[in-house]
Image (cartoon, helix red, strand yellow):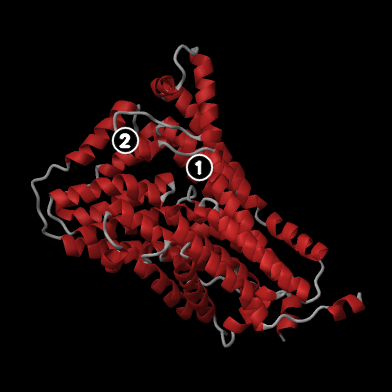
Amino acid sequence: MENKQNQIKEASLLDALIPIIVLVILLGSSVYLFGDNSSFGPNQIALLLAMGIAALVGIKNGYKWDDIEKGIVKGISRSLGAILILLAVGSLIGTWMLSGTVPTLIYYGLDLLNPSMFYAASCLICGIVALSIGSSWTTAATVGVALMGVSIGMDMSAPITAGAIISGAYFGDKISPLSETTNLAPAIAGTNLFEHIQYMLWTTVPSFVIALILFTVIGYGSESQDSVSRIEEMQHLLDQEFNLGFHMLIPLFLLLAMAIRKVPAFPAVSIGAILGGIWAAVFQPEVISNLAEQGMPAFKATVVVVWTALFDGVKFNTSSDTLNDLLSRGGMSSMLTTIWLIMCAMTFGAVLERVGLLKRAVSAFLKGATSAGDMVTRTILTCIGTNIITADQYMAIVMPGRMYKEEFEKRGLNQLNLSRSLEDGGTLTSPLIPWNTCGVYMHGVLGVSPLDYVFYAFFNLINPVLSIIYAYLGIKILRIPIPADLAAAKT
């Protein structure tokens, strides 16, 4: 054992930077070549190629492939709990779309629109929709597009409207248990999903309230005779397609009750998905009949459609393409690309960690960081830098999370501080960068450049700053005893 240790050389800073630089180049090329589709395969290949470079550096320094492979297996195993939750979330989205739970949330959310407070109302509506479906992209591409059209008809500012839509969409996405990034951040940091969401509320809710106040002030006094017919048309289509009512929200209330009772996320979300299927069978027989094959017996049609919603989601074919795009989603299969990305990212991070490259890079960047404020600030800045360099919000969560996980523990900081910082810095800043996949996407669907709406995406700008202020003032900073082995290593 001693001879083996003597054969291993300590990694240099150059060793640590080589695979990271290669990854940045590959991810940049991926975004350039594939655009919005870069997260659907190209980024995964980039991660595995960079992992190969990291492995070669490790072998050069004396590590054996068997040791590296064991590190990969260990790294992937850390994400298995999150993978199970993601699969359950996919099923939940599918059955809640089918049952009318999500359409009911959208319907009543659209009632909040008031032309005299259009910007604030747009922000709030998008927040409700994104919270209910867990996707900022889908919210922007459906309700967001409708609101942009309404703003043009009302002669409102397109950049401010876009900023309001993005603020609301990312607020809802950030605190929704159905969101991929909301599941990804605690998975990387090693925290519980519902505790992560609860802890985020301390910075997220004040930031959103401030954003709503700013949108109210900007839009105060704006009047229009426009009847917002597009919104009313969507409500009419929802009412026509589904049996709506407050009783359709019972699955949501039961899931929230389980979360409050601290039921583990995987069984809680799974139960919610099953309840959605039961609600669909009881309250939406017409919807199921429309989705089933013609001539199929009613009982068989119900079982087939609900079962399909669990594993492959639902695909509506109404008279409205906007409504179809909004509601046609969900199922376990919808999460496979995210799971693919998680596994590849965890593989890359595991190799960096196993051969000592991650530790070397972190020690260089964290030099001089002593307080909780320093740690949170550097995490958020690293997330923003990763968003700028790699142009991908998932990477802006995964890479800093892997880099700083052990360092937070060494400094006696609960991992919830890390998971919250990952979302404050990674998720929220991604649509503000023109070449980031989120910025490119928002530009494409809303028709407004990030350079134009960046100063009006108030929530996305305020939240990271507020998180840093909280950290330096010691507000809601959770601490843990420093483990004896880490304390000894630190000294």
Give the spatial CA distance, label 1 vs label 2: 30 Å
Quadrant of the snapshot with the C terminus: bottom right
Q: In which quarter of the image is residue 60?
A: bottom right
Q: What element carries label 2?
A: helix
Give above or below for 87 relative to 302: below
Q: Which of marks 1 and 2 is nearer the N terminus?
A: 1
> Residue tagged by mark 2?
321
> Residue tagged by mark 1?
255
Q: From the top left corner, tell me how far across and down residue 101 is, in percent.
A: 41, 35
Q: From the top left corner, tell me how far across and down residue 43 is, in percent.
A: 54, 58
**Residue name at image x 54 percent, y 78 percent:** 375
Q: In this view, does 257 lie to the left or right of 72?
A: left
State the residue in front, 111 or 288.
288
What is the residue that sits farthest to the front in this orientation? 33
Q: Is residue 134 left or right of residue 5?
A: left
Residue type beneath disc 2: Asp
Mark 1 crowdedness (10 Å alpha carbons): few <14, some 14-19, many ≥20: many
Residue type beneath disc 1: Leu
On the question of residue 417 being in view, the answer is: no
Question: Nearer the observer, disc 1 or disc 2?
Answer: 2
Q: From the top left corner, tell me how far across and down residue 429 is, in percent.
A: 41, 66
Q: In which quarter of the image is residue 433?
A: bottom left
State the residue in front, 479 or 218.
218
State the residue in front, 218 or 256.
218
Give above or below for 96 relative to 199: above
On the question of residue 374 being in view, the answer is: yes
Q: Quadrant of residue 417?
A: bottom right
Q: In this view, does 303 lie to the left or right of 355?
A: left
- Which label was assigned to residue 419? none
